[in-house]
Image (tube, helix red, strand yellow):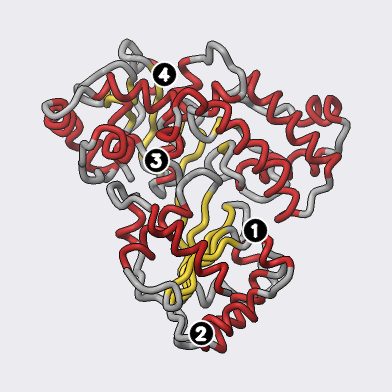
Amino acid sequence: MEELILKSDKVIAAQDLTFKRTLYDEIDWTNRLIGVMGARGTGKTTILLQRLKELDLSGTEAVYLSLDDLYFTRHSLGDVADTFRSRGGKYLFLDEVHKYPEWHREIKNIYDFNRELFIVFTGSSIIDMLRLPVDLSRRAIVYQLTGLSFREFLSYDQGLDFGKIKLADIIGNHSKLAIELCRKMAPLKHFGAYLDHGYYPFYKENIASYTTRLEQVMRLVIEYDLAFVEHIDYQNIRKILELMAILAEHVPFTPNIAELSKKLAMGRNTLVQYFHYLDKARLINNLYAAGKGYGKLEKPGKVLLENPNLFEVLAISNPDKGSVRESFFVGQLLNAGYHISLHNKGDFEVDAQYVFEIGGKKKGFKQIAGIEHSFIAADDMEAGVGNKIPLWLFGFLY
């Protein structure tokens, strides 16, 4: 136990508190069991360490444990928790829980039988809390951490702090909002940097190697996280990598399941499940026509990369601007909690209320003419007019 406390004290002491994700202040830290789920690289570990540093307690009272530590090949999490509590421990912060076998049962037992402990854990976005064999969903308050929004990127990269803006406010007051924001910064100057490298916070460690690092993250998600959480064998993992390569060449992609099944030598249902897995892993966003189901066996009507930074990682040297724009728009709205479906005339329908067409500043309204509550999200514009809204402004939703 002492070696774990020493490791914990060391990483907590080194943690910077200068920038905090918006989610940090939205978490109700008074809850006794909290989960922070999200894709690799989005900053889950940082949130844990920042909270521990702010608690400013000794290692015997508050400890950070990474469950991929070799220590846990020789000791059980339950025994460690019991020892920690018996020595006066109060705050048990557990990172990468999905790397520990039967983690959900261990955490349930720790929570049920150690009433004085506050437990915070992080895990992969692939984990479906409702499908776990033990009922953690009733016990834990679970938060989802996404990549940086454009608004958060401006704070992290430039020290420019702005509040979140609701979609209804953007739609109803975008001209005034954009003009006010433009007085404080040049949005288009920073927007290009965000699309290139601003989604995952680790870009600051070394921008030159960002693409290589992100490629490693993507491969780890597919080769390790998917295999571990969903129990997919290595041969099928190779096929998922092959599918990702195919998507990279064609996004935005309307899947032809019969053709893809033949190319990848797999059944239709298995292929559709792979689309579902990649969406859960936050590498793609699957979109469906309004009114369509979202089950594992329902093929997506359109597939987009989850965020624009992935284009370069997948060796798309000159990505289609329309694809990048759509990836940004859909990703920002989904991460902010809005529902998006495909529309039969416009590009997307949001919350069954608004219709959006995505394009450049010269994009016209011909395609969505006559549709009530329809708008254009236009790139390369600092401010918009009427129903044409600057694309970058949707990066302020979360």
Residue for point 33% across, 24% down = 191
Residue 131 relative to residue 139: left or right: right
Q: CA distance from mark 2 to mark 4?
A: 63 Å
Quick one: SS at disc 4? helix
On the image, numbered disc 3 is attached to which residue?
148
Q: CA distance from mark 4 to mark 1?
A: 52 Å
Q: Position of residue 120 (x, y in %)?
A: 47, 68
Whether residues under marks 2 and 4 lie with C-beta atoms below 8 angstroms apart, the answer is no
Disc 1 or 3, which lies upstream in sequence?
1
On the image, numbered disc 4 is attached to which residue?
367
Q: CA distance from mark 3 to mark 4?
A: 32 Å
Whether residues under marks 1 and 3 lie with C-beta atoms below 8 angstroms apart, the answer is no
- From the image, state whether disc 1 or disc 3 is nearer to you: 1
Disc 4 or 1, which lies upstream in sequence?
1
Q: Position of residue 73 (x, y in %)?
A: 73, 66
Residue 346 relative to residue 234: left or right: left
* Identity, as a three-letter code, of the amino acid under mark 2: Arg
For label 2, the crowd category at 10 Å Cα-Cα, with few meaning under 14, some 14 to 19 and many 20 or more, is: many
- Looking at this rendering, what residue extends furthest in the right direction? 265
* Identity, as a three-letter code, of the amino acid under mark 1: Asp
For label 3, the crowd category at 10 Å Cα-Cα, with few meaning under 14, some 14 to 19 and many 20 or more, is: many
Residue for point 56% across, 42% down = 282
Q: Position of residue 321 (x, y in %)?
A: 46, 15
Quick one: SS at disc 3? loop
Disc 2 or 4, which lies upstream in sequence?
2
On the image, numbered disc 1 is attached to which residue?
68
Snapshot quadrant of residue 316 = top right
On the image, numbered disc 2 is attached to which residue?
85
Disc 2 or 3, which lies upstream in sequence?
2
- From the image, state whether disc 2 or disc 4 is nearer to you: 2
